[in-house]
C-alpha cells in the first residue's frame, strides 16, 4: 500500500462484482459521480467497478480515486484493431475506468492509480494494452509511465496508435470542459460522444510476447 500525503492506495485483484468490495462499493460510486460532475448511468458504473485489478485511493474514510484494469475482452472497435490475430496466450489488457474526485485532482492520485494498473500489465508481459478516452491527459499519463519503464529497462520500446470512434459514448462524459487544443483530440466531437481507442504495443527485452504491427493488423 503506497501512501502520498494523507492518501492511501489499495489494490484488489479479480473483483468479479461491486459487491466484492463491501461498503467501498457505495463510496466508489459516489466518487465516480463527483469526478464526472454528474450522476452516471448505473449500468455503466456497475460495469466499471470490477476487473482483473481494482485500485482505490482514500483520504481517510472517503474514496477520492478509483481505477480498474480488465482483461482484453475486445469490443468491436478493438477487434478491428487486432483483426483477431492476437496469438492465444498473449494477454491483452484494457485500462478501464479511472477517476479522481475533482476536489483531489492535481496532487498525483491519478498517476498513482495508473502506476498500479500499468505495473500489473508489465508484470504479466502483456504485449498490448488499450484505453478509450475523450481526454488527452489520459494518454499523456500512460505515455509518461511507459517512458519511465524504458529508462528502467522494463520495456525496450512501445508504439501508440489512435483509432477514432464516432459517437462511441453517445454523449459528453464530463460536465466540465476538456482542453484538447493542439492535440489530435481537437478533431473529436466530444459533445456527440466521439472518442479515441488508443492501442499501446509494448516491446519487452528479449522479444518476450512481442507482436508486430503493419497495415494488415498484428502478426505474432
Image (cartoon, grey):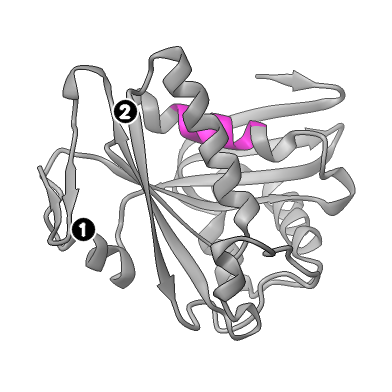
Image coordinates of residue 55 in percent, x first then y, are 60, 37
Number of numbered discs on residues = 2
Quadrant position of the C terminus in the picture: top left
Residue 8 lies in the magenta stretch: no
Residue 114 visible in the picture: yes
Residue 119 placement, left or right of 9: left
Residue sitting nearer the eye, 83 or 151:
151
Q: Which residues are magenta?
A: 112-119
In the rendered image, which residue does mark 2 sit on? 124
Q: Position of residue 19 (x, y in %)?
A: 57, 51
Image location of residue 79, percent across then percent down: 24, 65
Q: Quadrant of the N terminus?
A: top right
Q: Residues within 10 Å of mark 1 (few under 14, many from 20)?
A: some
**Left or right: 123 in relation to 10:** left
Which structural element holds mark 2? loop
Q: CA distance from mark 1 to mark 2?
A: 19 Å
Disc with the residue nearer the chain's start (1 vs 2): 1
Tell me which corner region of the image, top left, top right, bottom left or bottom right, holds residue 133: bottom right
* Foreground pick, 117 / 205: 205
Q: Which residue is mark 1?
A: 82
Residue at left offset 47%, top offset 66%? 196
Task: Name the element at disc 1.
Answer: helix
Question: Are the residues tagged 1 and 2 within 8 Å (C-beta)?
Answer: no
Query: Badge 2 local density, few (<14 within 10 Å), some, or many (20+)?
Result: some
Q: Could one spot residue 12 in this view of the protein?
A: no
Residue shown at the point (32%, 70%) measured from the top left:
77
Q: Nearer the viewer, residue 164 or 2?
A: 164
- When the figure is inspected, residue 213 is found, relative to residue 37, above or below; the finding is above
The main secondary structure of the magenta stretch is helix
Horizontal placement of 113 versus 194: left or right?
right
> Splitting the image into 4 quarters, where does residue 92 fall?
top left
Amino acid at each position: 500500500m503506497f501512501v502520498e500525503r494523507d492518501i492511501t492506495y489499495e489494490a484488489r485483484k479479480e473483483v468479479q462484482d461491486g459487491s466484492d468490495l463491501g461498503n467501498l462499493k457505495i463510496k466508489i460510486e459516489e466518487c465516480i459521480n463527483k469526478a464526472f460532475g454528474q450522476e452516471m448511468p448505473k449500468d455503466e458504473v456497475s460495469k466499471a467497478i470490477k476487473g482483473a485489478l481494482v485500485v482505490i485511493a482514500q483520504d481517510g474514510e472517503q474514496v477520492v480515486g478509483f481505477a480498474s484494469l480488465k482483461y482484453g475482452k475486445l469490443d468491436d472497435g478493438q477487434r478491428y484493431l487486432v483483426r483477431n490475430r492476437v496469438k492465444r496466450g498473449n494477454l491483452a489488457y484494457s485500462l478501464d475506468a479511472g477517476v479522481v474526485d475533482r476536489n483531489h485532482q492535481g496532487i498525483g492520485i491519478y498517476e498513482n492509480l495508473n502506476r498500479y494498473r500499468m505495473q500489473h500489465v508489465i508484470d504479466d508481459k502483456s504485449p498490448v494494452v488499450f484505453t478509450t478516452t475523450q481526454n488527452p491527459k489520459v494518454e499523456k499519463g500512460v505515455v509518461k509511465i511507459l517512458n519511465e519503464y524504458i529508462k528502467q529497462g522494463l520495456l525496450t520500446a512501445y508504439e501508440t496508435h489512435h483509432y477514432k470512434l464516432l459517437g462511441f459514448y453517445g454523449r459528453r462524459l464530463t460536465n466540465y470542459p476538456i482542453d484538447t487544443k493542439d492535440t489530435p483530440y481537437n478533431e473529436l466531437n466530444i459533445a456527440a460522444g466521439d472518442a479515441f481507442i488508443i492501442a499501446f504495443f509494448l516491446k519487452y527485452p528479449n522479444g518476450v510476447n512481442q507482436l508486430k504491427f503493419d497495415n494488415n493488423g498484428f502478426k505474432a
